[in-house]
Image (cartoon, coloured by chain):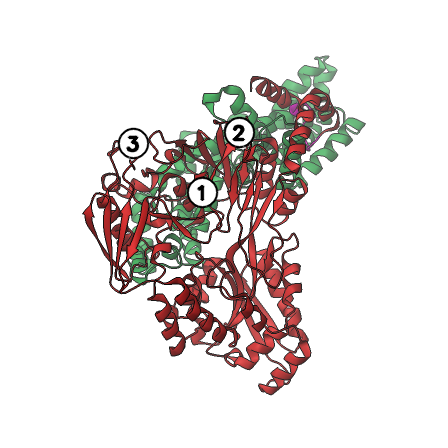
Chain colours: A green, B red
Amino acid sequence: MLKMMLKRFLQTIPTLFIVVTITFCLTRMLPGDPAVAILGIEAKQEDIEAMRAKMNLDKSLPEQYRLYITGLVKGDFGYSYSYRQDVFGLIISRIPNTLSLTLVALVFAFFIGTAVGIAAAIKQNTWFDYVFMVLALVGVSMPIFWMALMLVLQFSVKMNLLPVMGMGDWSKGFGDVVSHMILPGFCLATIPMATFARTTRSSMIETLSSDYIRCLRARGIREWKVIMIHGLKNALPPLVTVLGLQIASTFTGAIITEGIFSWPGMGTMINTAINNRDYSLIQGTVLFSAIMFVFCNMLVDMAYLVLNPKVKEV
Amino acid sequence: MKRKSIMALAMAAVMAASALAGCGGSGSSGGDTATTAAAGDTTAAAGETTAAAKVNPDANAAGQTLDAAISIGQTDQEATPGGTLVVSMPSAPLTLDPAGYTTMYENHIMYNVLETLFIYDKEYKESIPCLATGYEVSDDGLTYTIHLRDDVYFQNGQYVKGRKMTAEDVKYSLERSKEESPTDRVCRDFFDYAEVVDDTTVLLHMSSPAGPFITQLTEVGTAIVPKEEVEGWGDEFGSHIVGTGPFTLEEIVTDEKVVLKKSDNYWGTEPYVDGIEFRIVSDSNQAINAVTTGEVDIAMYLQGESIKRAGDEGLLLQTPSSAITYVRFNLQNGPTADPKVRQALTMAVDIDALVSGIYQYGEGTRAYQPLTAYSWGYDTALNALVPAYDPDGAKALLAEAGYPDGFSMTIYIGSTTYREKMAQMLQYYWGEIGVKLDIKSSTMAEWSATVPDSWQGDTVNSFGVSWNSNPDPYGFLDKFFSTATIHASSNSGGYTDPEMDKMLNEAFAMTDEAARKEIYVKAMEKIMNEYTGIYYAYECRNWAISGRVHDAVLRADSQMVVTSPFNNIWLSQ
């Protein structure tokens, strides 16, 4: 098992290397001069030249690439000229904000989604099943920004229950933090929740119609035990795959949600970085997101080992 | 607050129960009943705010002079001190260092912490003394004697503890601005050096006379800052600014908010509010929602449809900005190098219809000249020189210029709704006279990389953008029409004319406003007859403002003036 984990880990290196290279090329293809973006369009030519030199932009592309890679190897993500801070420090300072939002959304999504999925599978082809599966379909298809605005209109503007935007402040108490979390968390949860519900349902239906379940029932084992213990365990693997993918996509989906709710996370930072042509910061955040993706996939693979020991043989 | 949090927790439960897609039926109806009282409250608030919606009186009339900034809220009633004014703006400040800032958002925050020698008055017409008490200028225009207030102290910082501001600080700050600002803030090519006479007198020496110099000293980039703080913090000064203004910088939470607190040793009128919080809200609709719920008091820089919403809900405060929005032609190469063609292209457009077509919600108003109507150099009589809408006449002119069947040309614009609508309407109007317009829409970064200097070739035949400056004619005419700016974005059309340079330089070197105006009007007349472009609109400044804000002023520059000689914002408690 350890050997496989190590192998899996080594496999991520080329993937990340490719990501780094592509991001480097893509940022260089962005129109507009980063030095002008920082100094403003009225800046003096010599100031622009000086800034370009400071940012290493006066060097040839291969040279810039070499500097960037050697920096990365040493753990140096570069310096963000728009924020005037180290890229690494900036990203680290934002992760808790985005991660807390993402985690809340995922926990929300996973438990509710799975519960609905199981219920729908048991009550297959009843009105309950139809209603919730249609809702789930709507859930995956709904544009987040539209739903966010509708929810805000209803719960904040009309009913005045929840704050419109922003992140709560611990100094104002737990309630403040929670109330600021509900709307963005719910919005971000919609798509994964619907996905979980649909995946659980189909996986459960398949499991529940298999022979061993019929055997268990014939032996007179209690129905809830059949479903929750014997059924669910076998229905889980596809759900784990979906969970792994959803963690990563929810993390990136947070970019839109953060924008709408003025949530000071990675999403808002990526926006600012792109608008300011902040090459190092764009590269840093994309690289970080890539690491997240790769890491989640790795976790999924490892979870498989635990859930389904057969994988080892492959 | 406590009740709200409990309700919030309850809501979490309700939403969890209704689960899945959006507003599940039963859950939200329960919520309705629970909040009848709260709903009643908001209606009352809405009633108050309806009276607040104010749009600057029609600036569309042909004889327009734009003046009168717009004020809001009761000023006669007794003010109640206290509370924090919460202001939202769409983008985060990057640095608050006066010698490094580049955006308006930074400017608004700095304006409340730092102070300049002079400031603009309420009408955005004249500069009035702030840290200065007055000035004299020598007859040759080369020396300004500035008298300073004797009662000004810096805020407490890391390295300065309430030290008195003196002429040394003025010298340091202005010379630093000249040397270090990426953009020209102090007429840097003309202002030479400062000389300290005594604590309250400083001489500013010019290398050659510059008429707009004093108005330039209203620019927040020339604010007076203490040397110890600037040098102590180094590159970090931009996040720890210290000045002499009514508010101190308390906290910057990157991308989230900037918190200012009332200064306790301010020399001027004491602010009514305890502090200001600038919140970053990128979505205009959300900003209005937040004004409705009371989370934000003033939402600045509303965009597009949200302006209509703010108007419908009685929250809108609107006034035309001083920025000119225009389309200019390539004056050197391609078909538009011929003034006849340019005249024809101008005549082919119904500018009034163009403006009302682009700005559906009244968030733009008609302009005529390449100079803001807020300027003292503006002569309304010259508006008549803009040719009237006459497509047939335009066609005839084109034929005369050698294009009986028209031609193809390009327009380069930034990809915003307003510019794209404008280009599409021009495509229609010019199409009517046989000119095929190819629209090149891109990000502003790409635009700035393509358009300046493009007059040297003929790929860019015209371009659309807007330009803003303080209302001294210098900020418009010299930038648009002087050979000195031919490589800058403001003169991307490539205007160069020795006679014009002579006039502009002459007016620039004078310190007497009336004499300068005379020359500027002559220059403007010449420019208007050369059909350099279509200067069609002033886009409006749009705020959504809550009914609890009193004595706020929306000026053409959209400055967030909280405490000043002409207003002092207070909040209904």
Q: Which residue is denoted by mark 3 in the rendering?
A: B156
- Give, as a single range, the part of the protein colored magenta: B15-23
- Depth check, front residue: B103 or B189: B189
Which three-letter amino acid code belongs to the residue tagged 3?
Asn
The residue at 46%/73% (across/down) is: B522
**Which of disc 1 and disc 2 is earlier in sequence?**
2
| Res. B78 mark | 2
Please tell me whether residue B571 is drawn above or below residue B322 in the rendered image: above
Indicate yes or no whether the magenta region holds residue B146: no
Residue B329 % position (x, y): 51, 72
Labelled pair 1, 3 in contact (Cβ < 8 Å): no
Q: Which secondary structure lies at badge 1?
A: loop
Total marks shown come to 3
Q: Is residue B211 left or right of residue B465?
A: left
- Pointers 2 and 3 in contact (C-beta within 8 Å): no
Could you say which quadrant of the image residue B398 lies in? bottom right
Please state the chain letter of the residue tagged with numbered disc 2 in the rendered image.
Answer: B
Q: Is residue B166 left or right of residue B464?
A: left
**Residue at left 34%, top 39%?**
B239
Q: Earlier in the sequence, mark 1 or mark 3?
A: 1
Q: Residues within 10 Å of mark 2 (few under 14, many from 20)?
A: few
**Residue identifier under label 1:** B92
